[in-house]
Amino acid sequence: MWIDTHCHLDAGEFDADRDAVAAAAAAAGVTGIVLPAVAVSNFAAVRALAQRHDSCVYALGIHPLCTPGAAQADLDALRREVAASLGDPRFVGIGEIGLDFFVPGLDAGHQTWIYAEQLRIAREFDLPVLLHVRKSQDQVAAQLRRIGVRQGIAHAFNGSVQQAQGFIDQGLKLGFGGNLTFSRARQIRRLAQELPLDAIVLETDAPDIAPAWLSGDQFGEQHKARNTPAEVAGVAKVLGALRGLDAGPLAQAMWRNSVAALPRLAAFAATMAPSAPPASRLPASAETIRNLPVSS
């Protein structure tokens, strides 16, 4: 069965049907969902969701888009919450943290400080990180090397081969999701096909980055449709088609990689990891996408 290593199930887009969304994911064969926090104000929400749904685990962190309102008090609160959560088997790491140099108006220095301090918390407690790397791969990786964090996931990876190798050399996995399903995402598809399989994990970033069969095969359209954790099963089929892998071996590899990235998941592996994933078909539009050439 599949694992979604990055899903914001606490987001407002799910307020009307959150439990139904979680049930649909389970029906699609998604037995693991990682819920990263984005600010101190939603720590309790992600923890409560993880406690309510058997498939869910959570991480705690301050997202770069939330750094304008964050200060030392937020970092102190994060450290206290992390220390208090170490005995919770559903707590798996620090995240979502990182840098965003795409959204205008963010203070680069301030978000870099918040990010670096969270890396220090991760190192102090020997925890992995869930990283936001939008237009910031080199800067995020540089701080990882400087502070010495060597485990986690570079979420929604969209960099070069050289940048990918830098994260891999630092001990991290790379997250691939809905963007992988778009025929124009040639670089992402090429990376997913050619990188070592043990460097890859699957994700949705739900409710964002919906796959092509929900939003149309055009860049820029993915935010017009709501993504859900159930869609990681379809993303997995696209990855399997690109790499020539059947569902069973691929599902086992994705679970193995996810546990390597987030070792506290190991406590759930016996009950959540796959033995014989269902051989469900891709949505019709995804079957078309998987046959598109990866190279231009």
Image (cartoon, grey):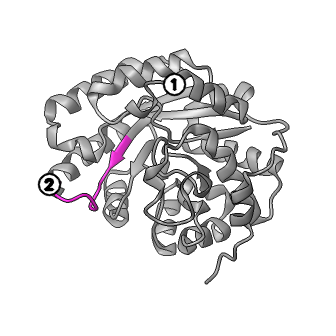
Quick check: can you spot residue 259? no
- Disc number at residue 166? none
Q: Who is closer to the viewer here, 165 or 10?
A: 10
Residue at 20% x, 59% y is 104
What residue sits right under mark 2 in the picture? 107
Residue at 68% x, 49% y is 234
| 69 shown above or below 133 | above
Q: Who is closer to the viewer here, 243 or 169?
A: 243
Is residue 100 on the magenta stretch?
Answer: yes
State which region is magenta: 96-106
**Which label sits in the foreground, 2 or 1?**
1
Residue 260 rendering spot, x and y as whole percentages: 61, 44
Secondary structure at badge 1 equals loop
Q: Using residue 286 as the reference point, say whether residue 95 is left or right of it.
A: left
For marks 2 and 1 on the same chain, the one whose residue lies earlier in the sequence: 1
Residue at 29% x, 33% y is 39
Going by the numbered disc 2, the residue's amino acid type is: Asp
Main SS, magenta region, reads: loop
Secondary structure at badge 2 equals loop
Tell me the crowding category of disc 2: few under 14, some 14 to 19, or many 20 or more residues within 10 angstroms, Cα based: few
| 207 shown above or below 198 | above
| 224 shown above or below 27 | below
Report the quarter where the C terminus lies. Answer: bottom right
Residue 225 rendering spot, x and y as whole percentages: 49, 48
Residue 87 rendering spot, x and y as whole percentages: 47, 17
Cα separation, mark 2 vs mark 1, equals: 36 Å
Is residue 234 on the magenta stretch?
Answer: no
Residue 111 rendering spot, x and y as whole percentages: 21, 50
Going by the numbered disc 1, the residue's amino acid type is: Asp
Residue at 69% x, 59% y is 285
| 225 shown above or below 167 | above
What residue sits right under mark 1 in the picture? 17
